[in-house]
Image (cartoon, helix red, strand yellow):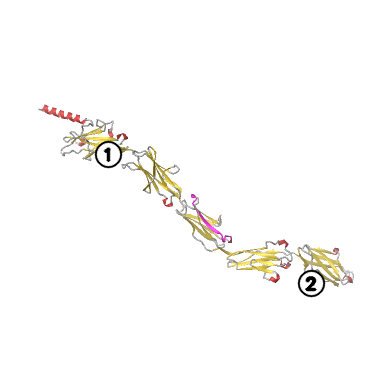
Amino acid sequence: MKSLMFNLVFLFMVCLILHAGADWSEGDDEPENMVMVDAVLGRSAEMPCNMEPGIKEDRVYMVLWFREGSSKPLYRFDVRGRPFNKALLWSDTNAFGPRAYFVTGKRPSAALQLEAVELKDAGIYRCRVDFRNSPTRNFQVNLSVIVPPHQLMIYDNSGRELHDVVGPLSEGADLVLTCEVRGGQPSPTVSWFVNDSIVDGRISLADQNVIVNRLEVPRVRRHQLNSTYKCQASNTKLMQPAEKTIRLELNLKPLSVRLVNKPSVLLAEKEYALTCEAVGSRPQAELSWLRETYKFRRGKIEDWSNETVVTSTVTFAPVPEDDGHHLKCHGVNPKIPGSSLEDTIMLNVVYAPLVSLQLGTSLKPQHIKHGDDVYFECNIRANPREHKISWFHNGNPVVQNVSSGVIISTHSLVLQGVTRQHSGQYTCLAANERGETASQPVPLRVQFAPVCKTDEPGLVGASIEEMLRVRCEVNADPSDVSFFWQFNNSGESFEVSPTKYVSNNGTISELMYTPSSERDYGTLACWGKNSIGRQLEPCIFQVVPA
């Protein structure tokens, strides 16, 4: 009897062993629905297998894993005659080897855990579960191995690879970004995100394993400064997508350039500070000062800035020459051609009159002679306008006298038929609310023929045979004068021989005269002559007995 029992047990064990070594044959029970499992290359995968018996009192004897097309198991979990934690484990070294182990802690759904998934691991697998009493159960798992993209690069429009920043671009320029993704199975989805919001790009297939997504942003605006542009590539939810983020750097035009203070009136020679402010330029605007189109170089310039505002203050004392001119503050971003802005103030400088006097432009100062008409021009620059003009000759006021040939007309003084009395220094004076100013003196030289220095005849007493020195002195311009003398009495008249007189200093002539008889008493007359003409009236000397 004992021998019979032994033989039965032996036959049962042999049958189990033979059953465990069975291949994936058509005689096996049809597997339940196939489970789809995705795994990422190089990561782990879980292939589920339901090992819960259909009868509560039943238990698992063995779990075998097969690969489609293979007749031999590649993994075995054997708990025959032992508890689960003492199970015998075997993994085919030509398949999974030590990368696979069976996890039962998640019952009823246990799983074959596979580490460091390889491309060759992809395929259809069958999990066969043998029970002590219940029928064998089969489960199918389709394992797909996902290959993530291995490279993601972003290029600008010139083909330069970007890492953190694109730009700086000038405000208004076009932004073009190209995202190139290499590798990935299945082909990844390549997307653009602007400030974390998805946007449409233009996708193309550059090569069998290269996907390109081109993003074009026309005419970027200042509000897009520091915007982020993220390219993302993903072909599975099992891992974080590959991505790269680029920040946009911009050069911005100044929004405004303005003069903070614009005084309506400036006093000449008083110091003022004008401040110009530029807002919104990136990098900072460069400010400069111009008077009309020329760089303003006077005074002191101080600059100040923070991240968004630049100011420039010019401190100067305006001069009369500034009046009516435009002082400009010019601001420009040197990185953006044509980005300049400016603000302007017209300088209204008030000052006392600036006065200059000159002879009429048609006159030749060295050739004015007796009888000519002469005029002066008084040039005045004043703000406010002058309200009074006065004329002076040798410091004495000149008043209009048309009958005497003195005519005053606004900025002109006309002298008709000038004589030697008109010679001298002339000035004009102008006055406004800021004060009064006299011009520098302008000399007037009137050339004239000789005239006697004294109008009264001279009386000379002499004895017979007494030699006299008779002095004849004239005024003349030019002073190079030639003389001649004449003697007159009641009975005769004759010219005196030049040997009898001499000329000194050009305007003086001395006659040596000696009466010899009573007939030599009478009248001596002296005339002078220069380049202007001959003296009209002679100088008279009465020679009488002493």
Instruction: Give the amino acid at mark 1.
Output: Met
Task: Between residue 398 and residue 400, name the one nearer to us.
Answer: 400
On residue 36, which mark appears?
A: 1
Check disc 2 and report its element: helix, strand or loop: loop
Is the residue 60 above or below the residue 299 in the image?
Answer: above
Q: Earlier in the sequence, mark 2 or mark 1?
A: 1
Q: In terms of image quadrants, where is residue 90? A: top left
Q: Is 325 a magenta residue?
A: yes
On residue 456, which mark appears?
A: 2
- Viewport quadrant of the N terminus: top left
| 380 sits left or right of 201 in the view | right
Task: Between residue 153 and residue 423, name the one nearer to us.
Answer: 153
The span picked out in magenta is: 321-336
Instruction: Give the amino acid at mark 2.
Output: Glu
User: Foreground mark, 2 or 1?
Assistant: 1
Is the residue 17 above or below the residue 400 in the image?
Answer: above
| 459 sits left or right of 204 in the view | right
Residue drawn at x 64%, y 64% as measured from the top left: 378
The extreme right residue here reads 517
- Viewport quadrant of the C terminus: bottom right
Q: Position of residue 477 (x, y in %)?
A: 75, 64
Q: Determine if residue 505 is in view.
A: no
Q: Is 85 a magenta residue?
A: no
Check disc 1 and report its element: helix, strand or loop: strand
Q: Position of residue 291 (x, y in %)?
A: 55, 57
Q: Position of residue 106 (x, y in %)?
A: 23, 40
